Structure formats: C-alpha cells, structure tokens
C-alpha cells in the first residue's frame, strides 16, 4: 500500500485517539472515506485533529446500544488521516479520511470538547503498515461471488480497476464500501489475515445473494 510522506511511521502512531463512533461508516488502510461533519462536538474533533496529527479513530457502536445517548463501542476500529477538507458557508466541514491502521481500544479516557477518546494499541494490526503477504486462495471464485452479489443488489463497481488491485487492497476497499450490515463490516474489520477476511467476505456475499434470490422467488 502506497503511503505519502505525510503519513506517520508505525512507531510514531499515537497512544490515544479521538473517536468518531458511526455505524456502517468504515475506513480501512489505504481506503478513502468521505464525511460530512456538522455536529458541534465533531467539528471540535476535526479542528483538534487538524491542529495535531490529523488522525481520527473511526469505530462502530454496538447494534444493541446504537440508540443510547452514549452507545457502547466495539473494541476494534481503524484510524483515518484527514487528507483533504473544505469548509462550507453553512458551518459544515466536508472531509476525506484515508485509512492508516486498525487499532484495539484498551480503555476510554476523559472526553475532550464533547467527543470521546481512547487509549489504543496498534501492535495486533502491524501488518496493515508492513504489508500482508497472504493472498485470496481462490480469487476467480471470490470475484464471481462479488459479481453475483453486485448484480442482485444493484451495486456498480469499476471491474477493470477492481481486477488490477492487489488482494489486500481489494479486500480493504470492499470492506469499506460494499453495502453490508454494520455487524458484517465489524466482523471483517476484526479479521486480520487477508486470506481469512476474503473467505469471510465471500461467505457473507454468498449468503446475501442467496437471500435475495429466495425473496425474488417468493415474489413470483
């Protein structure tokens, strides 16, 4: 995965991160995630991040506590670096996060300016930085499952570009951008080796495709 000179070295990743809990919004290493920021606490988070290392910890709330005022969060998320942003006349910030590395939350610490923060550990996901040499065991079959899923769910994908991506880049991109459920995305985020993540993803795609076909059959 190509990194710009602006990205920190793995050894320089911080021991704590500001957290942006958001269900279904997933960033993965090397993948870009656009965000529209308008809540005052997250405007403060972005301002503070821009004044320091530009890093934000994207993490999902648990589905059971999603509607709570302060939902519980999963233990694994991914840090993204603000790589571009613009301010709007109505007080919003439109930004792009580029995924840096996944992290494990060790404990939450005191809030700052209304947003949550946590101590984090990066070691489990060092392969995000140093490269994962594992490969998709059956790439043609994987892409076949992906094509069936996309056809059934109306998902448009630039296939020429997809087929040129390395296995780790491909699985990271799909994890972030396919319209899978937050629970499925979380399972993928927490799966470390590319080989295992691809197996899990293919299984999720096949199950979603089979479910769509059963629904279509019942309609006829």
Image (spheres, grey):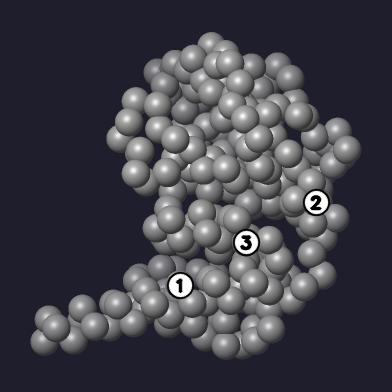
Q: Quadrant of residue 105?
A: top right
Q: Is residue 60 above or below residue 199?
A: above
Position of the C terminus, as image quadrant, is: bottom left
Can residue 82 be seen from the camera position used here? no
Q: Residue at x 79, y 56 (%)?
A: 127
Whole-percent x, y for residue 92 in the image: 45, 23
The answer to whether the residue labelled 1 contacts the one labelled 3, judged by CB atoms less than 8 Å apart, is no
Which sits in the foreground, 175 or 184? 184
Residue 11: x percent and y percent? 88, 38
Q: Is residue 40 above or below residue 205?
A: above
Answer with mark 1 or mark 3, whichever residue precedes in sequence: 3
Q: Residue 204: which disc?
A: 1
148 with respect to 98 (left or right): left
Q: Earlier in the sequence, mark 3 or mark 2?
A: 2
Q: Compute the Cα span from label 1 to label 3.
A: 13 Å
Asked whether the residues under the numbered discs 3 and 2 touch, taking CB atoms below 8 Å apart as contact, a structural biologist would say no
Residue placed under numbered mark 3 in the picture: 191
Q: CA distance from mark 2 to mark 1?
A: 26 Å
Where is residue 30? Give x, y as percent: 70, 52
Badge 3 local density, few (<14 within 10 Å), some, or many (20+)?
A: some
The residue that disc 2 covers is 126
**Up-down relation of residue 55 to residue 181 (above or below):** above
Residue 60 placed where, x, y %? Answer: 48, 42
């Amino acid at each position: 995965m190509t990194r710009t000179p602006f990205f920190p070295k793995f050894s320089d990743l911080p021991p704590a991160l500001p957290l942006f809990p958001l269900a279904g919004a997933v960033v993965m290493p090397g993948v870009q995630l656009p965000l529209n920021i308008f809540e005052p606490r997250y405007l403060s988070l972005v301002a503070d991040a821009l004044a320091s290392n530009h890093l934000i910890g994207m993490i999902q709330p648990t589905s059971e506590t999603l509607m709570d005022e302060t939902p519980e969060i999963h233990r694994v998320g991914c840090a993204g670096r603000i790589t571009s942003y613009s301010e709007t006349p109505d007080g919003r910030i439109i930004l792009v996060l580029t995924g840096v590395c996944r992290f494990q939350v060790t404990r939450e610490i005191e809030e700052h300016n209304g947003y949550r923060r946590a101590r984090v550990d990066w070691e489990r996901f060092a392969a995000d930085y140093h490269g994962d040499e594992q490969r998709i065991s059956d790439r043609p079959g994987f892409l076949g499952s992906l094509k069936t899923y996309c056809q059934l769910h109306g998902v448009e994908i630039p296939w020429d570009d997809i087929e040129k991506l390395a296995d780790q880049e491909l699985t990271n991109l799909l994890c972030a951008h396919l319209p899978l459920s937050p629970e499925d995305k979380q399972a993928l985020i927490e799966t470390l080796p590319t080989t295992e993540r691809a197996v899990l993803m293919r299984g999720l795609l096949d199950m979603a495709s089979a479910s769509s076909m059963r629904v279509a059959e019942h309609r006829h």
